[in-house]
Image (cartoon, grey):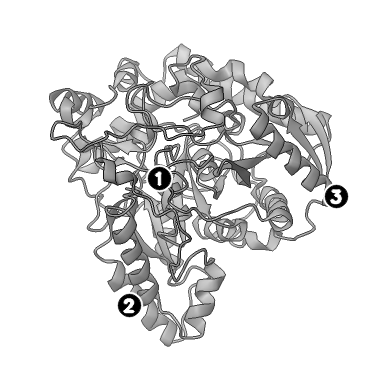
Amino acid sequence: MDRRLFLNQSTRVALTAALLPAVACQTTPDKPTADAPAGAPAAETLAGTGVADNFELQELTVADLQDRMVKGAETARSLSEKYLARIKALNEAGPMLRAVIETNPDALTIADGLDKERKAGKLRGPLHGIPVLIKDNIDSGDQMMTTAGAAALIGHKAKQDAFIVQKLRAAGAVLLGKTNLSEWANFRSSHSVSGWSSRGRQTRNPYALDRSTSGSSSGSGAAASANLCAVAIGTETDGSVVSPAAVNGLVGLKPTVGLLSRSGIIPISSTQDTAGPMARTVRDAAILLGALAGPDPADPARLPIPQGNLTDYTAFLKPDALKSQRLGVEKSHLNGPPAVAALLKEAVAALKAQGATIVEVELNKLVNPLGEAEFDVLLYEFKDGVNKYLANAGASMKNLADVIAYNKAHAAEAMPFFQQETLIRAEATDGLNNPKYKAAVQKTVTGARQAIDGLLKTQQLNAIIGVTTGPAWCIDWVNGDYSTGVDFSSPAAMAGYPHLTVPMGQVLGLPVGLSFVGSAYQEGLLLALGYAYEQATHKRAAPKLLPTVQA
C-alpha cells in the first residue's frame, strides 16, 4: 500500500529528521531483555559489517550466471548452494536481515534436475538454473508454507502452485525459498511497521540496518539487493513492489493489472493487485517479466491484453531509447525535500542529455483526492478476496473473522507493536454489491486512468516520471511508518497501469528511485526508457550492511 494510506491517513511527516538522517534511529534496545516484545531483536542485530562485500556471486546478473554455467564454472546446484549459504550467513545471523522467511527443502533437488537437463542439451530459457525467491503470499504446492507472514496461517501449505509459480518452474528457475513481508501485505493496521510480520519478524534494510525496507514486498527487496538470490518476485496493490525496490536500490516493475496472473496469491484487491519482478538491473527485471507474463483463464483481468503474450521483453532494451522521447516530470517532486529534489533534477539533466524532452506536469494533484475512495475499494475487496482464498485453501483459518479472532486470542505473539483495525474495518463491509463500493471503484479507476491518459495525450508524452518514494525511514515499533515527503505509486496503482522504478542515486547512503509511469501494457516502453537511463547513469550501488546511516 501507498504510505499515504497507512500513515493514519494524516500528515504525520518528519521531513527534517527523516530525509537527512545523521544519527542512528535508536529503535533497538541497548541490551537484550527477556521481556522484549516478539520480533524485537537484541542489540547485536545491528552489528553490520560496514565493509565491502566479497561474496563470489556479488552483483552478478542472470546473464553472468548463465555464462558461468555454460562454461562449466557453476551449475544450478552450485549457485543454489552459494545463495543458500549466504542466506544462512546474513538472514538469521550477522546483520540478521530476516529477508527470507523460509528456504525450500527441495531447492537442490530441483537444481540437480535442471543440471541433468542442461547436460542433455535441453535449456528452457534464460532462467534455466537461476535461483529465485518469491514473496510469502504466493502459493507454492510444495513443502513450504504460504502465510502472508501471519502467525494465524502458520502451517498452511498450498494445494498447488500459483499460476506464476507454474510459469516460473516451467522457465527453469530454482525456487530457492520465500521472502518475508509486511504482514497481510501491509493491510492490517494504520500504525503498521513495514517489513514486520508475526511469522518472519523484522526485515532490515541492507544499506542501513536500522532503516525500513518499505513494503509490503520487504523481504524480496532486501534479499535481491543483498544478493541472497539472483532475482525476486514481489506483489503490489499500491506501492508494494516499487517502494521497497526503490529504498533497497533495485529495479522494480509493477505491471499492468492482468499481464501477470493473480491466481494463487493471497489478495488485497482484485482491482489493483499484481505480482512483479524485483532485480538489480533492468535487463534482469525484463527477463523475469517475460517468464511470468501470460493469460490465466482463472483470473479474469479487468484490462484485456490487446496483443499476444510477449515472452522476450529484452528486445525493447536499447541504450538510445530516450532519444526523441517526451517525458512529463511530476512538478511537486522538483520542489520537494531538497536532497531528493536535487537527485531528480540530476536525473532530468541525464535524461535530456540522452535526447529526451522534459515538461512539467502535476499528476499527483489530479490523483491524490482519490485516496479515500481507493481505501474503501481495498476494504471491500480484501474481505471478499481473503474469504474466497481461505475457503478453498484448506487452512485452519476459514475466513477473515477467524483471523481476527486468532490475533485477538494470541495478541502477544500476533500484535506486539500494532493492532488490526484495518482487518476489523474490512470485516465490517457487506459485499461487492454495495453501491458505496461500486461508486468507489468507478471513481478511483476512471479518475486515475483519465489523469494519466489525459496528460499523456494533451502533453504528447511517452511517459511520466517522478520520485518513487523518499529515502528509507527509521524502523519505529512505537509510532509505525512515517512519510519521507514524496510518493508516486498511487496513480499507476489505481489505474492498473505499469510503473517502473530504477535507482536514481542516494541520500546519505540511502537509495532513491526514479519512476517511469505509462498507459496500459506499456511495459516494453517503460523498460526501454529505464534501461537507457540506467545505462547512462549506473546509479545502483551494492549495500554494505552498515548498522546505521553514515553522515
| Camera-nearest residue between 143 and 347 | 347
Identity, as a three-letter code, of the amino acid under mark 1: Pro
Q: Determine if residue 300 is in view.
A: no
User: Gap in Å between the C-alphas at discs 3 and 2?
Assistant: 47 Å
Mark 3 neighbour density, 10 Å: few (under 14) some (14–19) many (20 or more) = some
User: Gap in Å between the C-alphas at discs 3 and 1?
Assistant: 40 Å
SS at badge 1: loop
Between tags 3 and 2, which lies in front? 3
Which residue is identified by label 2?
Answer: 112
What is the x, y in percent for residue 540? 60, 53
What is the x, y in percent for residue 121? 47, 86
SS at badge 2: helix
Please report the residue visible at 58 percent of the width from the left and 25 percent of the height from the top: 485
Number of callouts: 3
Is residue 162 shown left or right of residue 153? right
User: Gap in Å between the C-alphas at discs 1 and 2?
Assistant: 37 Å
Label number found at residue 547: 1
Mark 1 neighbour density, 10 Å: few (under 14) some (14–19) many (20 or more) = many
Is residue 9 shown left or right of residue 463? left
Identity, as a three-letter code, of the amino acid under mark 2: Asp
Identity, as a three-letter code, of the amino acid under mark 3: Gly
| Camera-nearest residue between 176 and 440 | 176
| Camera-nearest residue between 194 and 320 | 194
| Quadrant occupied by the C terminus | top right
Please report the residue visible at 19 percent of the width from the left and 34 percent of the height from the top: 397
Please report the residue visible at 49 percent of the width from the left and 14 percent of the height from the top: 10
Sequence-wise first label, 3 or 2: 2
Please report the residue visible at 28 percent of the width from the left and 73 percent of the height from the top: 109
SS at badge 3: loop
Which residue is identified by label 3?
Answer: 355
